[in-house]
Structure formats: structure tokens, C-alpha cells
Image (cartoon, coloured by chain):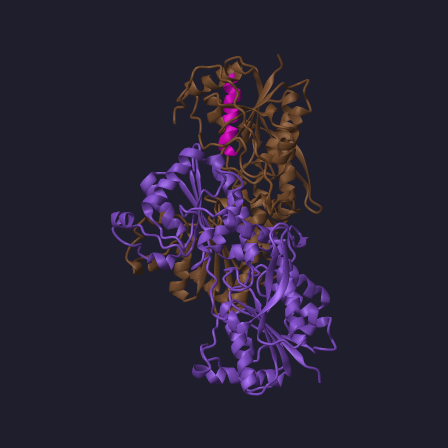
Chain colours: A purple, B brown
Amino acid sequence: MKINAMYAQSGGVTAVINATACGVIETVRQHPADIGTIFAARNGIIGVLSEDLIDTSYESDKVIHALRHTPAGAFGSCRYKLKSFEGNKIEYERIVEVFKAHNIGYFFYNGGGDSQDTANKVSQICHKLGYPINCIGIPKTIDNDLPVTDVCPGFGSVAKYVAVSIREAGLDVASMAFSSTKIFILEVMGRHAGWIAAAAGLAQDTEGDPPHIILFPEVPFIEEQFYQKVYESVLKYRFCAIVISEGVKIVASHFLSNSGSKDAFGHSQLGGVAPLLAQMVRHTLGFKCHWAISDYLQRSARHIASKTDVEQAYALGEAAVNMAISGKNAVMPIIKRESNLPYRWSIGDVALAEVANIEKKMPTSFISNNGFEITLKCRRYLEPLIQGEDYPPYKNGLPDYARLNNIAVTKKLPEFKCCKL
Amino acid sequence: MKINAMYAQSGGVTAVINATACGVIETVRQHPADIGTIFAARNGIIGVLSEDLIDTSYESDKVIHALRHTPAGAFGSCRYKLKSFEGNKIEYERIVEVFKAHNIGYFFYNGGGDSQDTANKVSQICHKLGYPINCIGIPKTIDNDLPVTDVCPGFGSVAKYVAVSIREAGLDVASMAFSSTKIFILEVMGRHAGWIAAAAGLAQDTEGDPPHIILFPEVPFIEEQFYQKVYESVLKYRFCAIVISEGVKIVASHFLSNSGSKDAFGHSQLGGVAPLLAQMVRHTLGFKCHWAISDYLQRSARHIASKTDVEQAYALGEAAVNMAISGKNAVMPIIKRESNLPYRWSIGDVALAEVANIEKKMPTSFISNNGFEITLKCRRYLEPLIQGEDYPPYKNGLPDYARLNNIAVTKKLPEFKCCKL
């Protein structure tokens, strides 16, 4: 009986996480002597715990290949963080039981910092319990906050989406500014770090191009300085295009005290700093504002994915399988930047212990002194990541994304209730 | 001295209005014997009134050709509606003066219903004052609400953007629904008509595909029926993807009375029915919601424009010039649908008097009986309009859009203050 593999997707999905899945599964299929079946756990680690497995053998080569151009998580993802060994021994033991039941010798966990931590712990518990397995974490997160790797797959495509969007919307506002809208605000993802907001800065080719203002969560929001900058931009360029990270804490005491109270639903519940900011600008400067919130559109926009991002996502999946076969364990393949101009990258690896639960912050040197722009250094880092287009095939005017059968594997174990579900 | 032409863009801009400008200018350049210079009025009719004209001769053939793939209004647009003759004689006379001063014999006004009315009135006043001119209106509006023409340029590209976006975000939510977000709401443009929201329905290839619910401004919002449909969708498909037209009037008396008051900023000012709807679903059904508002992104998204739309936009510009040269006046070129399968279209024309200020509503037969979906008839109408991709060229990872010099023409007349500015 051959040793099998298991692959699972975790956390918020991206435009290219399925490209990694494609890299994993296609590479496994090229090594029939080393790996038997590759199962996918449905909804990440929850699928492992509940023995809810998918047999990927039922998917044709063509469908698996189509994963490369399909956004989101084809096997389902999850938001479920395993607790420490001490607090949660039963779940770790269950994972090993499921591995045993299905003869899993290779485990690939595709996610962000939390997932790398999970992969690391799974590796440790297997070792402790004497179960032989090669656990490989595969990076994925639009937040670009994993350490060591030059970039996280998923980020380059969001970066491209955001830069394209602000360039296009900027042209729109420029057209309308004379007699109508003068301010446009685009809210982008990024609760703790301004990586995605920073990427919008790539749209600015020459002085005066949108975006005129970027608001980073790393920079304290100072109302007066912000109004001043908006006003200057309208004076100089007739309009002002603003990109704001969702994580920016808006201090608007003056405005809020004028309005008497918070909004009735509670602003934080409604979500969206863009509408609040728009209201402040309208109220204080009197300019007509429009605002957009891309939300999931930005991270699922496979139609405008970065070719570089797609290639790296695939290559990391491929590398993960090769590392596992060569006997590596508790590592994560990473992107190493070899040079900037021309951009060249290679694949390396790092111990999971070195990446688990460590957040990579955006360097201070990436934000201009006034706090509203990116620096040249930041541009040099970001620019290569959005290079190239990798259009999906279209059918009937729409992207023709993969549809998997996701055939369930017969369960061999008694039912198990996840602790948190 | 040869007769000159004037072109102007009006109202909200689109991803393809510059493709029409390209069609107009390239066609004029092919007829040097008929037309001397083609001027563009800066910011639509305001540029005509203030004699703020651009000499397009200074733009190279290459730059003019690049307008075909450049979104928004390259010469500036405006929101400025001329009043009736009686109330505003001075402005109409000024227009004729500007025409005379620059020897304008052809006037091309590119816009929606209001603009067609303006073009018509300009034609009438010129006739009344004995000034010979050929006034041609050229259709443009993402709202798709001009009568007679099968479709309005700009709509097909918004339609494609919205359908692509809900397909992509739908895959994202499907991945996350097991342990996280179950509801996704996309708010799209359309204050009076649900054309754009309807287009999202094209993303649904088979039963269960997103979007599961479309909320049209044509259908009264009934809270209980909506919740019921959301709940059913989550039960059946594990998630629910909703597209809502910005014009839907949300009746949420129960919810609002629970919360005690309207939000402090006034909901209508904050804009966005999506966050309100999300809050209602969360409050009533307890599901985690995400929501997006595309705003200007949807109408400027040239990167995902419909090829059909681009071709029609260009062809209408071309036709407008040919009609003017052949002596037509006070008409608008239109798209005539010759057949559905395969989709074939031709160019016709209609008198401006027949389109000015008339709004085309979405037929009742385009909305399903339950009020939440599009009918097959609607699909047959919409489907051809999003066919084909027409990608712009990219440079450094981003669309390489045209940059015009927009060289101003020397003014010949005394200053004039527009009535409303």
C-alpha cells in the first residue's frame, strides 16, 4: 500500500491559492512511484478533524489544470485555529488518527501565519506519537505578512487589482471633477499592515497621478493634515483620489462631536472607513465624494491576476511536493528575490518554527515622510510583483473557472466533533 | 476655410466613451476634404459655453488610437443640463456664437438622455438663428436607459464587470462559508432601473450558482420574503450571494425601530444600501456578512471591458461622423439587433426628438415571478452584450492608458459665465 498525501487550504482565500493546489496535485501525479493518492481535506483542518476528505483522483487532468486559473479555495477553506497542545490534545491526536486511517505520509497545509503554526504543531505531535510524516507548510496570504519569504502568493494579484482599480477610477474622477465629484476614496483590505494600500501607489507614474493620498494603518491619522492634503490636491490637480486601508483608525472627534453621536448601528458594525471618511471630507471641505469598497472582489479577482503571482503560487506548490518527497519536514518553501532589475526569483525553504505566528510588518522606509505616499524603495519592492497578465479562458463572455466533483472519501473512523464547532 | 467639427462628452463617464471619441476623431481624419479641424469641448457643454476648446490636431494618430482602450472622458465631462429655450436664451445664443467663431459645422454630443435633449435643442436654436450645422447625438450611458437603440455603449462593459465580479466573489464566499462568511452583498449602480443588477444574473450558469438573489429597484422590497430567500439559499447552497441595485428602497421598519433611530450621519448621505442590508441580515438571521460597493470601479473598468461594447462604441462614433458628412441633422446613431444567435447588429439612426428625455425601463418580463432573478428572456437579451474581451496593452504591470496633451484653442470671444456655475 503506497503512502498517500493530504492537502488543505486555510484562512482567507486568494486569486491564486488554487494555482498552488494545481502545483501540488500536478506534481504528485508526476510521482506515482512516491505518492499514492492525494486527498484534499474539505474546509482545511476542519476536514482533517472530521475526516471529511476528498479524493482528488476523480478529477481529470484537465480540471486539475484549470485550478491554475480559478480563484478561491476549490476544496473549501476555514477559519479555525488549533489551540496549544496542552489545551487541545484531543484534536491533535485525532489528526494523527485520521492520517493513520488513510495512510497519509505527506501533509501540505496552505495558508498564512496561523496555518504555518498548525502545520508545525502537527509535525511535532506526529513525531511525539511516533507517526512518520512530512509536514510542509505552503505560504498564502494577501496580507503579505509572512516572514522570510520575499512575498506571499495572493498578494501580487491583490496589489495588481488595487493599482489597476485606482488608475481607472482616477481617470473617471478626473473627467467629472470640473462640475461634479472631486474626491474618490477606495477602501482596501489590510487590518494591521498597509501592504495592499501601498500597492495602489504603483498606479502613480508621474506627479499628480492618482492616488494622491494613501492612508496606512502604520501612520496615525491626523485630521487636519489629511484635510490639508486633500485641499492641496484639489487645488493642484482638480481632484483627489484616496486609498485607505481598512485598518486605519479614523480620529474624527470634531466631526463626530458635531454630529452628536455615533451612528445608530454602531459604525464598526456597519464596517467601512471609506463612508466615514467621505462624510468627513464632504462636511469639512464641501467637496462631492464617491467611495468604493472592493472587499472580496479584490482578493478573488483572478481575471486580473498578476502573472508573477500565479507562477510563484504554482511553483511553491510544486516545490512543496518535491521537498516532501526528498524527505524534508516542518519546512515551508519560500520565494527568494535574486535581483530587482530584471526581477529574478528562486525557491528556498525555511523551518516552520521560524515563520509560525510571526508577522512581517511593512518597513518604515516604505512610507514617505509626510505619511501619505510610498517611497521609491517601496516601489522597487512592489513593482515586480504585479508584472504580467495571466488571463483565464472565457466562455460566453465570462471566465471559465474549474468545477470540481469533490468526491468524498469513505470514512473509516467514528465521528468526531471539533472543539469549536 | 474648411468647416470644422466639435465633439463633447457629457454626463457620467464609462469604460468605452473614449472608444467613441476615437471613432469620431479617426473618422474625421479620414475625411480631410469634408472636415477641417475637430475640436473637443473641455468638460462637455460647459467647454462650449466658456469657449474652452481643445485642438485635437495636436494629438498623434497613435494617441488618438489609444483612446479606444482608455476609460473615462479624455476631454472631461460635465453634469450640466441646459434649461428650456425660454428660461435660458442667453446660453443657447452663446453656443451659436462659439460655433460661429470657430466655424463649426458639425457638432457631436456624446451622452445620455439629457445630452440628447441638449443636442436636439442646439440643433433647433441653430436652425432658428439661421446658422447651418449638423448636430448628431451619440449614445452613451451605463444605465442603458436610452430608447430605440438596442443597447447603450458603456452598459455592456459594466454588465461584464458585474457578472465577472459576482462570479469571483461567489467562489470566495463558497470557500469560506463553512466556518466564516455566509453572505456576500454586492451593491451596483442603477438608481431607477435594474439593468446593471440584472447583468449579474449572467454569472449563474446552473442552479445554485451565484448570484442567488438580485434586488431590483423595479421590485418592492419585502423584508420577510427577502429573509426567507436568504435563509433558503444558505440551507441549500451553504451560502448566499446577493446583488443589490443602489436604487432599491430598503424597508426595514422592524430593524430600524429596534435600533431606535436613523444613523447619525443620515443613511442617505453615507450612501450604500449594502451595509444596511448586511446589518439587517446579521441582526435577523445571525449570518456573517461581507459586502462590496464598486462605485466608479464598475464603470471605469476598461481592463475587463466587453469587446462587443467597445466595437459598438467605436462604430457609433464612426457612424455619427458619416451621418454628419452625408447631411443628417438632429439624429442619433443607434444599435439595431439583427439576430440573437448568433448575435448580429447593425447601425441605424433615430431622430433626437424621439430619444430626448425618454427613459427606457427594464421590461417586467425580464424579472422572475419571485422578483429575485432574471428570466430567460432577459438572459437572451443581455448575453450577447458581454461577449468578447478587449484587453488594453500593459506596461509595467498596469494598463497603458492614453495621455492627451489637450492643447487649448485660442479664445476669440469675450468671457462668458455659465448660468449655473
Report the front residue among A207 and A52: A207
Report the front residue among A148 and B208: A148
Q: Residue at x 58, y 87 (%)?
A: A130
Give the answer, above or below, for where A240 lies relative to A37. Answer: above
Image location (x, y in percent) of residue A58: 69, 73
The count of marks equals: 0
Image location (x, y in percent) of residue B48: 49, 23
Q: For residue B200, say whether it is visible.
A: no
Report the front residue among A316 and B352: A316
Q: For residue A161, say whether it is visible.
A: yes
Image location (x, y in percent) of residue A69: 64, 59
- What residue range appears in magenta? B112-127
Q: From the image, give the main secondary structure of the stretch colored magenta.
A: helix
Give the answer, above or below, for where B38 lies relative to A361. Answer: above
Q: Is residue B194 magenta?
A: no
Give the answer, above or below, for where B113 lies relative to A413. Answer: above
In the image: residue A87, left or right of residue B135: left
Image location (x, y in percent) of residue B191: 45, 44
Q: Residue at x 62, y 12 (%)?
A: B1
Q: Residue at x 55, y 50 (%)?
A: A380
Tell me the quadrant of the picture where the C terminus of chain B can be found: top left
Give the answer, above or below, for where B300 lies relative to A416. Answer: above
In the image: residue A25, left or right of residue B121: right
Report the front residue among A27 and A165: A27
Q: Is residue B117 magenta?
A: yes
